[in-house]
Image: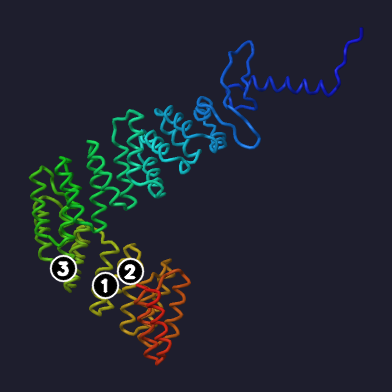
Amino acid sequence: MKPHKFPSSQILLHNKLKSATVILSNQRDSVALFSSTPCSNTNHTQTETPYQSFSTDSPPVSTHQALLNSIQSSQWHFVKHLAPNLTPDLISSALLSLQKTPDLALQFVTHTGFKNLDIRTKCLALAVISRSPSPKPTLQLLKETLASGISTIKEVFDELAVARERLNAKSIILFDLLIRACCELKKGDDAFECFSMMKEKGVVPKIETCNAMLSLFLKLNRTQTAWVLYAEMFRLRINSTVYTFNIMINVLCKEGKLKKAKEFIGFMESLGVKPNVVTYNTIIHGYCWLGRVEGAQTILDAMKSKGLEPDSYTYGSLISGMCKEGRLDEASRMLEKMKEIGLLPNAVTYNTLINGYCNKGDLEKAFGYKDEMVGRGILPTVSTYNLLIHALFMEGKMDEADDMIKDMRDNGLVPDSITYNILINGFCRCGNAKKAFSLHDEMVCKGIQPTRVTYTSLIYVLGKRNRMKEADDLYEKTVCKGDG
């Protein structure tokens, strides 16, 4: 009997299926594939396939173990491919399994798209990632969550609390980081609300977190809120550090309560906290800011009596205070004394002296300090040039002012709105309307918004040239735009 012959097409199909079976058998534990039916042979027991379904139109849906295997083997391109089909439950179960490997959890949510997760899953991810040695990734993701505005601060806090319970976590670092994220985003009210919600849960923030809040309220000039928070910290027995006291002394100085600021030094010492150079510098700056140099020097003497040496900031504040009082010769001597003891003045200190001598009309001395700072390797700032250009215009030295502008640009500095206002005002004062309006157009082209000062100068020059209709039109335009 002749052997039966299969058609060639059937033989070809049979060989292809046989080949595919071998490939699937060898790749059982890797990314897989084409079937929802488990493969088996005589050497292996039946194992779970990575996907429950597959279609050519959308990515397959992964099972928990298969997804975990892909994460642990860093198959991120594959995880990213699966992301659209991963359910919140599946992502959450994977995150729970990654508790001991927060770095993997971070990579997982990064590749699946953290911003696309619902708030509950996000907070679980944050809770897991917060176990990393570095707080930076968690802090950054918290800032992204808050900045999105999708959830209120209370919703975020509550979901973080739920996530913390799911992980049976004892640490309160998540709440501390949430407050820090609020502070970095300048969301003072949200930070305070978090503080209050922590109290309700019977936990208190670390002193570093409280300091971040106090510092924010100081920067926002919300001094009353800073005192409310400080009083609550005291009631909760959160021990203040020298940094805490320095912030509160700064608050008192901002409020103009210099006597109380001095008394605060005694208060902190009674609690066993030693004042440092920053403590005294803060009060010295407060006195000098109000032009009370004698009071500042009293604090300087007290500082030295404690064995603390003044630094560049100390001398900079005193020089500033002396310049405010018009005591320029004393300010210059203070600068020399500063240099004698090896302290290097910064650009701010030089600008203070330049401003003082410009106001006095002593341009030779002002330019001398500009040359000195350049000789010491301290680059003049935009403020340096603004002061000198303004002084030159006030003296009617237009050509020299133009040279300064050229020098400024040659040094890679870009004129700011103050520079343009000085220039426009200068040209308007000498009646050069064409040049003034040309500079106005230039600043607008560079994206610098003209201010009320700009338009006041332009209206002045139009009026001076009897171009009253144009002056009236520009005034109306300014009122309509509401330029500040």
- In the rendered view of the protein, which quadrant contains the C terminus? bottom left
Residue type at mark 3: give it.
Answer: Gly
Q: Work out whether residue 342 can be spotted.
A: no
Between disc 3 and disc 1, whose residue precedes?
3
- In the rendered view of the protein, which quadrant contains the N terminus? top right
Which of 305/199 is in front?
A: 199
Task: Tell me, yes or no, whether the two marked residues, 3 and 2, touch with CB atoms within 8 Å.
Answer: no
Image coordinates for residue 191, horizontal then vertical, percent: 28, 48
Q: Which residue is mark 1?
A: 355
Residue type at mark 2: give it.
Answer: Ser
Residue projecting furthest to the right: 1
3D distance between C-alphas at marks 3 and 2: 21 Å
Residue projecting furthest to the top: 1
Above or below — where is 258 with respect to 90?
Answer: below
Does residue 476 appear to the left or right of 201 in the view shown?
right
Above or below — where is 163 with respect to 209?
Answer: above
3D distance between C-alphas at marks 3 and 1: 15 Å
| Crowd rating for badge 1 (residues with CA inside 10 Å; few <14, some 14–19, many 20+) | many
Q: Which residue is mark 2?
A: 383
Q: Which residue is mark 3?
A: 291
Image coordinates for residue 146, horizontal then vertical, percent: 38, 47
Place residue 118 in its image quadrant.
top left
Which of 84/245 is in front?
A: 84
Between disc 3 and disc 2, whose residue precedes?
3
3D distance between C-alphas at marks 1 and 2: 10 Å
Between disc 1 and disc 2, whose residue precedes?
1
Q: Work out whether residue 215 can be spotted.
A: yes
Does residue 270 appear to the left or right of 29 in the view shown?
left
Residue drawn at (27%, 46%) of the image:
193
- Give the colour scheme of this rendering: rainbow
